[in-house]
Image (spheres, helix red, strand yellow):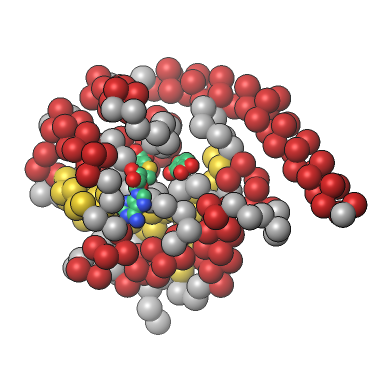
Amino acid sequence: MKMIILQFLFFSIFTHQTTTMENNIFEKVDEYIGNLFGDHDASLEATERSLAEAGMPHISISPNQGKFLHILALLCGAKRVLELGTLAGYSTIWLARALPKDGKVITLEVDSKHANVAKKNIENAGLKDKVEIRVGKALEILPTLDGPFDMIFIDADKPPYTEYFEWALKLSRPGTLIIADNVIRDGKVLDDNSKDEMVKGAQRFNRFLAKTKGITATIIQTVGIKEYDGMAIARVNETE
Ligand code: SAH
Ligand code: DHB
Ligand code: MG
């Protein structure tokens, strides 16, 4: 019992610190970076606004995370990108904008309302020809897809992240970049006794990622205007 109380205290103090004290400076610096580069245009802003208008959760990646994924897609020379979890298409737009004329993002979304909002936002951004939204459960659509993809962004529901990653590997080639959002969850992944299914999904995925052979991987912590979290980054190795 004492242990449980101590653990509770530890995590309360821990989350308190990360959500109040430090986040303030991280938020301000995140905004500073965004303002400095100023590449958040009207289509991206309209996409963010569409979340509130449609009563959808505000869980898109942040502007600077979008730019980061955009740069990663450019670095990969990506032509074919796969995304799991479309929401309003915010990350989709950042990814699609990094592709050549004949490039394609295939994005999977289980909620048809989300998919419809995303479709409008993507059209509004002039990216209709570069994005294909597939509506359904990711685990049902994945077996129907033809690989390889150059880059894969995993950002759907958290409990099956390990299974999503196994599919991502099947749909990869040497050099494919696989990114998974939300794998640190405000530091809650440190709690081995967590009952939170999203945290458990991230913990299981992180362990699986670390022991997967044939990839080069790490996790970077993400701070800023969103809650403290992390993104896993894995590159599929060349075969010997
Ligand atoms: N990538 C988006 C945010 C995605 S939020 C962005 O950054 O802009 C997660 C999305 O995954 C939600 O829209 C949710 O409906 C969807 N989702 C949840 N479970 C899913 C499943 N089993 N298959 C496909 N999509 C799913
Ligand atoms: C949640 C999902 C996300 O993809 C995210 O970036 C933040 C939060 C969530 O379901 O809580
Ligand atoms: Mg996310």
Give x and y (percent) for residue 170: 32, 72
Which is nearer the eye, 56 or 21?
A: 56
In screen coordinates, is 26 left or right of 96? Answer: right
Q: Is residue 128 left or right of residue 141?
A: left
Relative vertical location of residue 47 with respect to residue 158 in this rendering, above or below: above
Residue 186 visible to the viewer: yes
Residue 229 is drawn in which quadrant?
top right
Q: In the rendered view, does 128 fall on the left or right side of 148?
A: left
> Which residue corresponds to the image point at 58% horizontal and 37% vertical from the top-left?
228
Determine if residue 76 is in view.
no
Q: Furthest residue to the bottom?
A: 240
- Percent x, y of residue 116: 19, 38
Q: Nearer the viewer, residue 32 or 109?
A: 109
> Residue 93: horizontal and vertical position, in percent?
25, 37
At 56% from the left and 24% from the top, the residue drawn is 27
Q: Which of the image's four quarters has the C terminus?
A: bottom left
Relative height, residue 68 to residue 30 (above, below): below
What residue do we see at 23% from left, 39% from top?
113
Identify the residue shown where x is 24% and y is 63%: 141
